Image: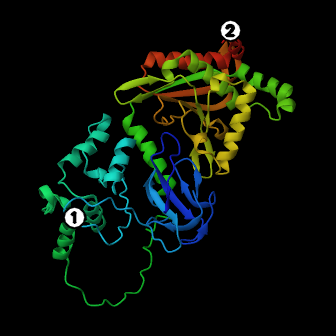
C-alpha cells in the first residue's frame, strides 16, 4: 500500500507553504528518512523526509506552488504505481469507477488576493474542494470560519465523492447538473454526461507557433521581481497585520548612558568566561521579559471574540537574513539568565541566517523586539507580528546634548517606539509598560529588584 507524503504542520501560525525544488527525481527509489522535497514558509526553508522505503511518485504540484499544510504532495510505493487517491466506496445505485482518480488539491488563495480564513476553514475547504473566494466570511473582519464553509456545503446539491472529484478536475459547475442517482444525487455518470454534451468539436491540428520572447520591461524598470513564494507570503502577513489591527504608536526617548556603561562593564568581566560579549539585544531581552511579567496585558493575543493573556513569555527577536526578515523566538525568556538569553539568541540567529531554522525556532512568539539601531535608524514604526498584541522598535544609541540639573551635558540617548493593537490594550496601560522599559534601561540595576 502506498504511503503518502504530506506537508507537515510547521508551527501554530503556518497554514500554507511554498514548494521548493524536488531533491530526488520522480519515480526514483528512496529510503526512509531521506530528504525528498524542499519547502518554504515566510520565515524559513525546510526539507520533507520520506516516511518509508520505496519508489516516490510526485503529485501535480510544481516548484513555486503555494499549498496548505497537510496536503498530500507525493506517494511512496511500488515502481509501477502512479500518484492517485483512494476512491471512497461507491454509493448505492452507482457502479464503482474503473479508472483511477488523480489527486487534485484546490488551493485556498484567491488569484487576486489572499482570502483570510481560519485553519479549520482552510482544512475543510481543501478536503471538500471548496473555493474560499466563493465563501462569505462572518468571522472578525470578514474572516472565513468553519461554519461559513459548512453553510456553503449545505447549499450544494447532493453529490457522490467520486463525482465531486471528477467535476473539480474537469472544472464542471455541479450546481448546473441534475442528479440521476437516489434522491436526485449527482453521480459520476451525470458529470461524464455533462462533459460529453459540452465537449466542442475536435479542432484541426494547429501549426506550432514559434516561441514568444518574454515581454520587454518598461524603459523605466531595471528589474521585475514577482510577488510570490516567500516574498509573497511575507507581503500577505504584513498586509494582514496592517489591515486587521488598530495600530497605535508610542514614542519615548530614553537616557541609555547607564545602559551603555553596564554593557561595557559586562564585556570586560564576563566575555572570556561566557565565550561571547553580551550585546544590547541580550540586555533588552532581559528587560522586556521582566516588563512583560509585570504587565501581563501586553503579553496577549486576540482569539475570536476574546482577549487571551498568555502565561509563557516567548520573546521574538527580529533578524535580518538573506531570505528576508525572520523572527527567532526565545521561549520562557523571563526564566532565563542574561547568559542563557545571549547563548540561545546567538544559536537561533545563526540557524536562521544559514536557512537551517527549526519550525519551533520561528513560531509561538508572544511579543517581538526589532532593533534597527545598527543601521543608524533613530525611530521607526514596526508592523505587529500577528497574532501578538504589540512590538517594540529600538533605534540607535547616539550622544546628544541634554539638560541635567540645570547643566547641558552629553548623554547617550535612545528612542523606543511601541506599536500596539488598540483592540487589546488602551493607550495609558501601554504607556505604563513602555515607561517601565524606559526606567529599566535608565537604571538597569533595578532588574535586581524584580
Q: Is residue 433 visible?
A: yes
Numbered-mark total: 2
For residue 203, side relative to residue 289 (left or right): left
Which mark is nearer the camera, 1 or 2?
Answer: 1
Which corner quadrant of the image does residue 320 belong to? top right
> Is 15 situated above or below 398?
below
Residue under the image location 33 percent in, 72 percent down: 99
Indicate the position of residue 341 as horizontal and vertical percent values. 70, 30
Assess disc 1: are there few (<14), some (14-19) or many (≥20) residues with their C-alpha within 10 Å of its C-alpha: some
Sequence-wise first label, 1 or 2: 1
Q: Is residue 247 visible?
A: no
Work out how far the residue at label 1 is from the one at label 2, CA to CA, in angstroms. Answer: 91 Å
Residue under the image location 35 percent in, 30 percent down: 304
Residue at the disc numbered 1: 94
> Is 307 situated above or below 21?
above
Residue under the image location 63 percent in, 23 percent down: 334
> Is 245 situated above or below 443?
below
- Nearer to me, 426 or 134: 134
For residue 269, side relative to residue 33 (left or right): right
Indicate the position of residue 296 as horizontal and vertical percent values. 52, 18
Q: Dot 1 lies on which element? A: loop
- Nearer to me, 141 or 19: 19
Indicate the position of residue 4 as horizontal and vertical percent values. 49, 58
Indicate the position of residue 272 as horizontal and vertical percent values. 87, 32
Residue at the disc numbered 2: 405
Residue under the image location 49 percent in, 29 percent down: 390
Amino acid at each position: 500500500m502506498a504511503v503518502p507524503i504530506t506537508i507537515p504542520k510547521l508551527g501554530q501560525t503556518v497554514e500554507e507553504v511554498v514548494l521548493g525544488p524536488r531533491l530526488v527525481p520522480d519515480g526514483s527509489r528512496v529510503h526512509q528518512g531521506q530528504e525528498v522535497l524542499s519547502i518554504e514558509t515566510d520565515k524559513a526553508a525546510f526539507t520533507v523526509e520520506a516516511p518509508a522505503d520505496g519508489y516516490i511518485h510526485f503529485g501535480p504540484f510544481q516548484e513555486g506552488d503555494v499549498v496548505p499544510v497537510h496536503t498530500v504532495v507525493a506517494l511512496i510505493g511500488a515502481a509501477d504505481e502512479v500518484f492517485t487517491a483512494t476512491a471512497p466506496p461507491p454509493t448505492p445505485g452507482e457502479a464503482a469507477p474503473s479508472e483511477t482518480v488523480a489527486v487534485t488539491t484546490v488551493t485556498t488563495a484567491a488569484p487576486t488576493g489572499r482570502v483570510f480564513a481560519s485553519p479549520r476553514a482552510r482544512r475543510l475547504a481543501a478536503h471538500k474542494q471548496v473555493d474560499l473566494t466563493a465563501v462569505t466570511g462572518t468571522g472578525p473582519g470578514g474572516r472565513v470560519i468553519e461554519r461559513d464553509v459548512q453553510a456553503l456545503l449545505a447549499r450544494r446539491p447532493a453529490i457522490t465523492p467520486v463525482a465531486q472529484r471528477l467535476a473539480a478536475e474537469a472544472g464542471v459547475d455541479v450546481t448546473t447538473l441534475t442528479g440521476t442517482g437516489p434522491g436526485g444525487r449527482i453521480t459520476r455518470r451525470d458529470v461524464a454526461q455533462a462533459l460529453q454534451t459540452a465537449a466542442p468539436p475536435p479542432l484541426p491540428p494547429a501549426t506550432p507557433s514559434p516561441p514568444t520572447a518574454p515581454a520587454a520591461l518598461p524603459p523605466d524598470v531595471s528589474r521585475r521581481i514577482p510577488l510570490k513564494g516567500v516574498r509573497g507570503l511575507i507581503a500577505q502577513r504584513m498586509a494582514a497585520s496592517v489591515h486587521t489591527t488598530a495600530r497605535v504608536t508610542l514614542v519615548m526617548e530614553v537616557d541609555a548612558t547607564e545602559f551603555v556603561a553596564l554593557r561595557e562593564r559586562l564585556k570586560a568581566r564576563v566575555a572570556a568566561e561566557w565565550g561571547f560579549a553580551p550585546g544590547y539585544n541580550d540586555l533588552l531581552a532581559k528587560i522586556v521579559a521582566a516588563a512583560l511579567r509585570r504587565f501581563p496585558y501586553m503579553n496577549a493575543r486576540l482569539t475570536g471574540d476574546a482577549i487571551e493573556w498568555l502565561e509563557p513569555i516567548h520573546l521574538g527577536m527580529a533578524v535580518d537574513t538573506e531570505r528576508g526578515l525572520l523572527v527567532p523566538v526565545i521561549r520562557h525568556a523571563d526564566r532565563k539568565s542574561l547568559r542563557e538569553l545571549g547563548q540561545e539568541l546567538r544559536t537561533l540567529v545563526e540557524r536562521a541566517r544559514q536557512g537551517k531554522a527549526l519550525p519551533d525556532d520561528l513560531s509561538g512568539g508572544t511579543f517581538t523586539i526589532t532593533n534597527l539601531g545598527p543601521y543608524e535608524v533613530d525611530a521607526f514604526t514596526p508592523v505587529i507580528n500577528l497574532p501578538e498584541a504589540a512590538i517594540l522598535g529600538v533605534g540607535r544609541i547616539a550622544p546628544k546634548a541634554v539638560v541635567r540639573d540645570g547643566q547641558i551635558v552629553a548623554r547617550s540617548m535612545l528612542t523606543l517606539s511601541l506599536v500596539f493593537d488598540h483592540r487589546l490594550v488602551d493607550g495609558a496601560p501601554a504607556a505604563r509598560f513602555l515607561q517601565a522599559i524606559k526606567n529599566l534601561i535608565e537604571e538597569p540595576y533595578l532588574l535586581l529588584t524584580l
